[in-house]
Image: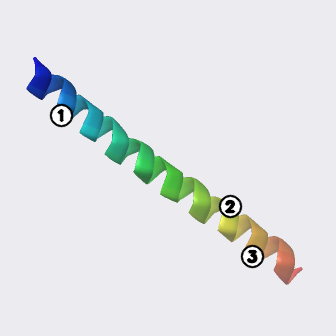
Amino acid sequence: MFGETRVDQIHRASVGARAGVLDILKHAACEHLLSDR
């Protein structure tokens, strides 16, 4: 059971990290488009 929970934690962390990176890229892209106008 401990091994399963650890794998779940790692999986959740990697998914969260990916979502965070996408959010940062989207935010940066929006700022870039706004600053160009």
How many C-alpha atoms fall within 10 Å of the one at disc 2: few (<14), some, or many (≥20)? Answer: few
How many C-alpha atoms fall within 10 Å of the one at disc 3: few (<14), some, or many (≥20)? Answer: few
Identify the residue shown where x is 26% and y is 40%: 10
Image-based side of 19 in relation to 30, left or right: left
Badge 1 vs badge 3, beta-carbon distance below 8 Å: no
Helix, strand or loop status at disc 3:
helix
Q: Amino acid at mark 3?
A: His
Rendering coords of residue 32 (x, y %): 75, 76
Residue under numbered circle 1: 7
Rendering coords of residue 2 (x, y %): 12, 22
Identify the residue shown where x is 85% and y is 78%: 35
Give the CA separation, mark 1 to mark 2: 30 Å
Q: How is the image coloured?
A: rainbow
Q: Amino acid at mark 1?
A: Val
Helix, strand or loop status at disc 2:
helix
Q: Nearer the viewer, residue 21 or 7?
A: 7
Identify the residue shown where x is 84% and y is 72%: 34
Residue under numbered circle 2: 27
